[in-house]
Image: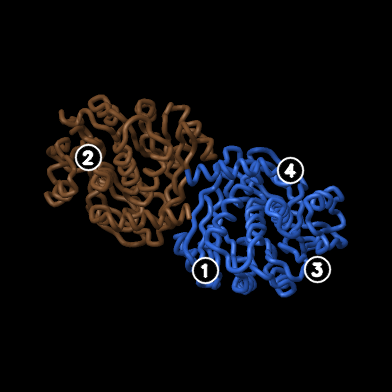
Chain colours: A brown, B blue
Amino acid sequence: MDEAVLIVGSLAYDSVSSPAGSVENELGGSATYGGLAAAFHRRRLGTGTVGIVGVVGDDFSEEDRQLLKDADLDLSGLETVEGGTFRWSGSYHGSMAEAETHETHLNVFEHFQPRVPEHSKSPTITFCANLHPIIQSDVLDQAPPSRLSMLDSMNLWIQIALDDLLTVMKRVDLTIINDGEVRMLADDDNLVRAAHSVRSMIGSTYLIVKRGEHGVLALHPDGAISIPAFPVADVVDPTGCGDTFAGTIAAHLAKGTGPIELNELRAALEAATVTASFTLEAFGTSSLANLDESTFNKRLSEFHTIIHG
Amino acid sequence: MDEAVLIVGSLAYDSVSSPAGSVENELGGSATYGGLAAAFHRRRLGTGTVGIVGVVGDDFSEEDRQLLKDADLDLSGLETVEGGTFRWSGSYHGSMAEAETHETHLNVFEHFQPRVPEHSKSPTITFCANLHPIIQSDVLDQAPPSRLSMLDSMNLWIQIALDDLLTVMKRVDLTIINDGEVRMLADDDNLVRAAHSVRSMIGSTYLIVKRGEHGVLALHPDGAISIPAFPVADVVDPTGCGDTFAGTIAAHLAKGTGPIELNELRAALEAATVTASFTLEAFGTSSLANLDESTFNKRLSEFHTIIHG
């Protein structure tokens, strides 16, 4: 059976502080959060496997590798090379809407050449999680998906690699972007207008604008979708929420065939919103890695009641 | 037949500039927007009349008075006294989330003593629109409602009349507050926690937190409601949106009897969100005063599709 979801992204050690406390060298990265979220929903939905393409250094712990294996992630595309794993440190303040980055050490990512394993070259979904857009493009070359290509990004690539980012955005079917980034790309303060103009600019079939604590706005050929965030009272650490959100969408869209239906996208976005709320409630991957189906289903049903009655 | 909704609030002449243009001495005020919105929905829903308690100066134009009469507002509680009508000037920039106030002239409001007409003293809903909390309390004394008392306020009263504001908030059944104000009152950056803590602080049965372009969060004894904003691409002037929103809720809740049901509140909030989107699209009251039922119903149905599928 082909891979359901192939994810390329970062694996990292994060040091994070927030008003709720702090952690040092905690397992993180866009492929980690995206992969764990996709793997969780793969089990719920009964789709094929989720594979990760990425690189770690020789300091990557056995324990963390085991955590990814325990989630049934296919790690054959995960390279280990001499050097240090990517490290990021940052902090959150006030409403915790945005991280303040203290340090970024690319380490082994600096010369990363992704290699997609043979058995992963025809996935249903190829999801380029946040990573340098050139690496995202490279993985799209190696693994064109049967159903949908999607990418997530960050403001850094708008600032330092805009042309590469636009090139890869123009290639994918579904682009995920946050509110600040969509305003920056469109040079327009109005979010709705900015979203439409970015969608025309990149020719994306589906555009998803993440608005953090304010929810999500999505543009689909058949109409718009707007969903508020799940109301979380105990925000601990927003790191990885966007990746959790995107990984959940990837797993959901791997379930069907043909074009993505409007209500299929809506269901994926609702599940993604709820999954991200668990990541928000703890440092690192612990709440996501330990999430069980009944806890998730209960909150999803609570969310449906809050937004639909 | 008793009044369905009694509204006390301001009638003003506003001078507003935004990236979309500017207007001078345009009819405005919380009772004006709230009243026009309530009157529109009163016609749709077939409830009793909507009355306004307020004061204007002898500079208040016949044309503006006629506009209020044409909306079938009961103006017997509207006093005209010697002096100038309340004037406000402000501007909106960037994402236009908040107004920058340039000047406020209370004029005839400085010594306003509200007098509720005899026939308006037993309304179904008493809605204290944004106004000094002492005047709000005074109107609640004169016109205790048969179903629900509600109030809207603004950050100014938190800053200069906190005790009076808390006193009137503790009296009403339903408080409407915006996201910045709820965080300020609770001294908590987390909106969800702040909303719960303000609700406990004032003992409000129903609390509605307006989040501007991010929608609305409501707390009801039976659960929470979260609704995104209607996605508006052409924001012209946010002045009066909150009053339009609140006036719509007042009219909707005047329709039933007994405690407000969770889904009754949801329907009111959805209609309020859509009504406010029309106010947002033009300067002054023009789009609200000229709104027709079929235009409203079409957008309400579009909104249902965007948020519920």
Q: Are marks 4 and 1 on the same chain?
A: yes
Q: Residue at x 55, y 72 (%)?
A: B202
The chain holding disc 1 is: B
Type of the residue with mark 3: His
Of tags 1 and 2, the one toward the viewer is: 2
Q: Position of residue B10 (x, y in %)?
A: 74, 59
Crowding at dot 4, Cα within 10 Å, few <14 / some 14-19 / many 20+, comes out as few
The mark found on residue B59 in the picture is none
**Residue at the spot of label 4:** B290
Horizontal side of A258 relative to B131 (left or right) equals left
Q: Is residue B180 visible?
A: no
- Mark 4 or 1: the one toward you: 4
Mark 3 residue crowding within 10 angstroms, few (<14) / some (14–19) / many (20+): few
Which residue is labeled 1 in the image? B199
Horizontal side, residue A68 vs residue A239: left or right: left
Residue B121, image quadrant: bottom right
